[in-house]
Amino acid sequence: MYYFINDYSEGAHPKLLEALVKSNEEHLTGYGSDPYCASAKEKIKAFTKVDSDDIYFISGGTQTNMIVISTMLAPYEAVVAATTGHVNFHEAGAIEHAGRKVLTIPSHDGKIDAGELKDYLATFYADENHEHMAFPGMVYVSHPTEYGTLYSKAELTAISDVCHEYDLPLFLDGARLGYALAAKHDLEIEEIGALTDVFYLGGTKVGALCGEAVVFTHNNAPKHFLTQIKQNGALLAKGRLMGVQFDALFTDDLYLKISQNAIACAMALKKGLIERGYHLYIDSPTNQQFIVVANEELKKMQEYVAYGFWEKYDDTHTVIRLATSWATQMRDVEGLLAMMERH
Amino acid sequence: MYYFINDYSEGAHPKLLEALVKSNEEHLTGYGSDPYCASAKEKIKAFTKVDSDDIYFISGGTQTNMIVISTMLAPYEAVVAATTGHVNFHEAGAIEHAGRKVLTIPSHDGKIDAGELKDYLATFYADENHEHMAFPGMVYVSHPTEYGTLYSKAELTAISDVCHEYDLPLFLDGARLGYALAAKHDLEIEEIGALTDVFYLGGTKVGALCGEAVVFTHNNAPKHFLTQIKQNGALLAKGRLMGVQFDALFTDDLYLKISQNAIACAMALKKGLIERGYHLYIDSPTNQQFIVVANEELKKMQEYVAYGFWEKYDDTHTVIRLATSWATQMRDVEGLLAMMERH
Amino acid sequence: MYYFINDYSEGAHPKLLEALVKSNEEHLTGYGSDPYCASAKEKIKAFTKVDSDDIYFISGGTQTNMIVISTMLAPYEAVVAATTGHVNFHEAGAIEHAGRKVLTIPSHDGKIDAGELKDYLATFYADENHEHMAFPGMVYVSHPTEYGTLYSKAELTAISDVCHEYDLPLFLDGARLGYALAAKHDLEIEEIGALTDVFYLGGTKVGALCGEAVVFTHNNAPKHFLTQIKQNGALLAKGRLMGVQFDALFTDDLYLKISQNAIACAMALKKGLIERGYHLYIDSPTNQQFIVVANEELKKMQEYVAYGFWEKYDDTHTVIRLATSWATQMRDVEGLLAMMERH
Amino acid sequence: MYYFINDYSEGAHPKLLEALVKSNEEHLTGYGSDPYCASAKEKIKAFTKVDSDDIYFISGGTQTNMIVISTMLAPYEAVVAATTGHVNFHEAGAIEHAGRKVLTIPSHDGKIDAGELKDYLATFYADENHEHMAFPGMVYVSHPTEYGTLYSKAELTAISDVCHEYDLPLFLDGARLGYALAAKHDLEIEEIGALTDVFYLGGTKVGALCGEAVVFTHNNAPKHFLTQIKQNGALLAKGRLMGVQFDALFTDDLYLKISQNAIACAMALKKGLIERGYHLYIDSPTNQQFIVVANEELKKMQEYVAYGFWEKYDDTHTVIRLATSWATQMRDVEGLLAMMERH
């Protein structure tokens, strides 16, 4: 059986486990005040070239999105996202449960368009009744998107410009940010830091057991952010669990190396799929590949590969996702490709 | 100046004020427990032919929508509405502020389509990841819609059937329900009672100073609903304010008569507009008429008529709303039409 | 039957109804933007000597408390109140439903003590773990209190000083503020304006059908406060309902005159009760009088007076409340006293 | 330096780390659907003798309290707890942030009293205005309490009886439950299962890196509980992190053994403290010991022991907490005692 179902079906990269084992007996203070958290923050500052001390660790992506969005927005404000944005679709209404509306604009392979965003905002303020509507209060993008696609530097700059014009913070969900940086890209991490107001470096899907590192790019964390994390139930007593892991992830470029391995495997997979005549649903440069497969073939595939169901394509075809991770090896890709049909 | 800006720019129908004056010195118990509220409920039961004691008065439409939706839904459930539904657009995020998501399906002149609703629900449950999404928990329709249109009996029956199939309560926002019943229609009030789980008879926009009468159609009000109204800050100490008004509204068919006057005026207006060559934006059978007007003409109109801005049509045209109310008189319609251009 | 059950069992003062009738046919803009609201605000500015334009009308007390507290506090902040404060006890958890905690300090006949408040705040900040607790974010007092008592100028000044020291806004619930100003008092309305950050002049319990006038004392209303009222479902389309009433209430000193009548009646009642040997539960200078009555006597009283149950005193006695209102007349007091026993 | 500051300052018990390392490469499904979670649940069922499949893992105590309380209560319901209850004091208002009120009754060394609970409930329902108040909807106890004390079987049975009488679920916060079971006690785990409706076996403070195992004792988890965990941001993608740890904790009695070690150390410490003439603030039978120390002595202690600040005792004395954990060894106790003064 080959496992390409997602990027969170194995445990942690071995170096993270080693670090956990090595530090295990140390007596450390709780709630993120330990030296591993401090060291991880310094390394993340160096990696991102962001000059800000407001870096926090939160255990998962939905939790991070919910806390960042609800604490940065006033109650009467809403977050603007693509219809396909994770915050709109796959978080069980967490944003709304926290009292904030998600306003949607069109998704283009998972991405929003700066022009459409600007039109949306202009239309909102032109509406004489806009005081009876939730105000657009921040903009959410994911990078890579839920469809594996990436923003170019020009695209994110244009979005950032619109945000500045309307005085809206820009939030980048980087649950899989490592894969963006390891893929063919023209948007560098320091540019992300400069163009956004807050973003995160995902750990859960890039080799950690859990944890996302939230970076407020200009010391702009919401007031008493630690208390607000606690109030949302998300403050781990043993903050070391995330501190030690992120410290290891950002030692010796491990975060990038993990991501590079996943991308190399994904590109080999993509190449092989194209060679075998598969229909790519989206042309993704990152670790998630989407193909359209006939339902009959899918039945056979279930015997040799664990894949992710994505969505119904038509009555006889389905879109599936094949994802690579820190644990994927090139021989897994080769093995899988050897099993797959040629069309 | 002619006033067609909306249906809430005058006070109450004189008979309601008379009733308030007449009952003013009476010592009545508070919070809706007075005999006027009781009498109003009985008259509403008779009018709607609904055999249910769960009838409540809440002071405004957004408040009613927010309370009904948030108390009928579990936290993990969302309300399904048209993209143009009042709950999605013009309530400042009140539903989300109360913790519930609004899931949207297409709007057809303000209405949702039973087939699209069914597809939406089928797709939701077919999604293997639907436990990671907010569950559709109730369906919201407005009647008349925000565009003045009406559901036919067949249309609402089809929606109700889908709701039953998926065990979802159906909620009908009747902020302007009187106008639906006074217009040319084939959906009777008793059918609304039979097809929905909860609906309301709007007072604010049909001749009252404030108040909506919420009817849970089969004694199915959420548990301790009075306490939940209080918890939302919406329980008036002097509940008589709504009891006396609704008692008067449902005495001697006043609710219908008010509505019939508004509809007669609106139909005369519509006829005149068509004769004068105006472009109807939507073919509305109720008290709200929408026309597309050139921006230049609009400037002149501002001198003789108060209208409602609706939306930009194109760079040189605007959609405006002309609404009639209990206070509109036929001579106002004639006067306005006399001022308007012929195209 | 004599009616002393509460101060909201009759309708509105006749002058308010007259004003509603007189203005009824006028075409007015909605949502509080009409000239009556504007005029009422100017009169309230003059009455309170507060130099602030941030004056809003909200239909009831619980709604006002909920909206003011939840919009002025950050999510991680809580309101400090007496254990007996209306926000803690009799609002069905509305403050918490809006996501904010109520922190309680002792009640002294309904009042909080500046020294105890200061100790509470000092203890909070001295606690090394206070970042794991809800932060005290504002202070709530009611004046008159739920027990009819009043703060002296010295008392409120001391509380205000503590608030300034800790940078906490001070909120005064004036649901019955008129009665405080008409009673024997040494705290003037302009002092209330100077000592607090926000307070309200209650209408519902001082002669209006509904409505409270919220005064932010230094143009410090929360941002987009109108939208936030809407988001809480509390924005009436026919804002005139409150504008016209408050305009009348603050014309020719009516607000004070209504209150003075109620206080005169209450003081005559109190005097008569003392003469008849009744045990005052609290020495209240305002329109609410609390007496301890033997349960046996209470049974007889039920035949001639409508009173308010307050609380059990002991196994054989009960505390009841006798309240006067705009509608109470001196002959009602005399009539009631004539029926009551001498002890 | 000796470390007695709390029970979460070291990492995980080595056997848990071993299990994480050993299972690390396995491909497992996410969100708690893996075989380790399933195995852990079976072992917990056996350990607790609870016949219920509704067992869930949530990463921390505050998160668990917030989710359990807010999903089991209707919006109009509140949780009844001791004033000193963790949910009332040290969770940054998480319960209220989730919209639910905490109603408090007196704390007796951290415990509530069944008689006082019953009186509270009886008084609530006797209040004619109770529909204007938040309804008591569940009862919260912690065991051990925040002060290290334990309920006897008789005490918890009496509380459970009152809960049954008023149809209120009983929730036991077992963040340190292992220590209760390892201490001198007369309340067995199967009795806890029988007397409560939901409780949890804390992992974070009993040898795990994170995680609490919530047991709904009679298949009574709130509907779609997994979705509700997700909606609160608390569903870990790599659910294995908790599954593997809890599976190890409940293998070969490790949970009890960890706890027994901590209790043995705590009892030796307590004995030594008494011998040295220290004033016990509370007579705690569990892993947390509280002593009153003169502030001058405290300064010296800071050089050789990490302790927990608890609260100010008087102007010259402080209450401190000394806690043992899975990692405490008897020689640490002996070493600490050797440093401590004799009084």
Image (spheres, coloured by chain):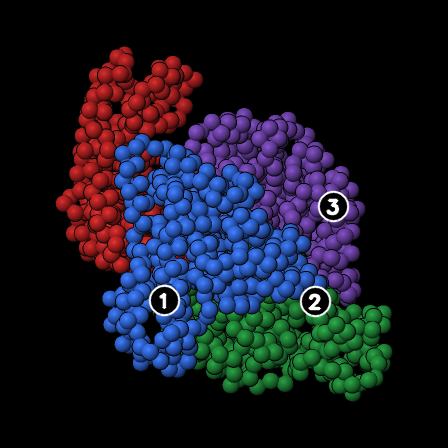
Chain colours: A purple, B red, C blue, D green
Foreground pick, A30 / A141: A30
Q: Judging from the image, what secondary structure is the residue with disc 1 in?
A: helix
Q: Judging from the image, what secondary structure is the residue with disc 2 in?
A: loop
Residue furthest bottom in the image: D275
Name the residue: 51% across, 40% down.
C54
Foreground pick, A59 / C155: C155
Q: Residues within 10 Å of mark 2 (few under 14, many from 20)?
A: many
* Subunit bearing disc 2: D
Foreground pick, C301 / D282: C301
Q: Amino acid at mark 2?
A: Tyr
* Disc 2 target residue: D8
Q: Are marks 1 and 2 in one subunit?
A: no
Q: Are marks 2 and 3 in contact (CB under 8 Å)?
A: no
The circle drawn on residue B160 is none
Q: Is residue A116 visible?
A: no
Q: CA distance from mark 2 to mark 3?
A: 26 Å
In the figure, is residue C147 to the left or right of B248? Answer: right
**Quadrant of the frame with the C terminus of chain B:** top left
* Disc 3 target residue: A53
Name the residue: 52% across, 43% down.
C49
Q: Are marks 2 and 3 in one subunit?
A: no
Q: Amino acid at mark 3?
A: Asp
**Quadrant of the frame with the N terminus of chain B:** top left
Q: CA distance from mark 1 to mark 3?
A: 66 Å
Name the residue: 20% across, 32% down.
B263
The circle drawn on residue C269 is 1
Q: Amino acid at mark 1?
A: Leu
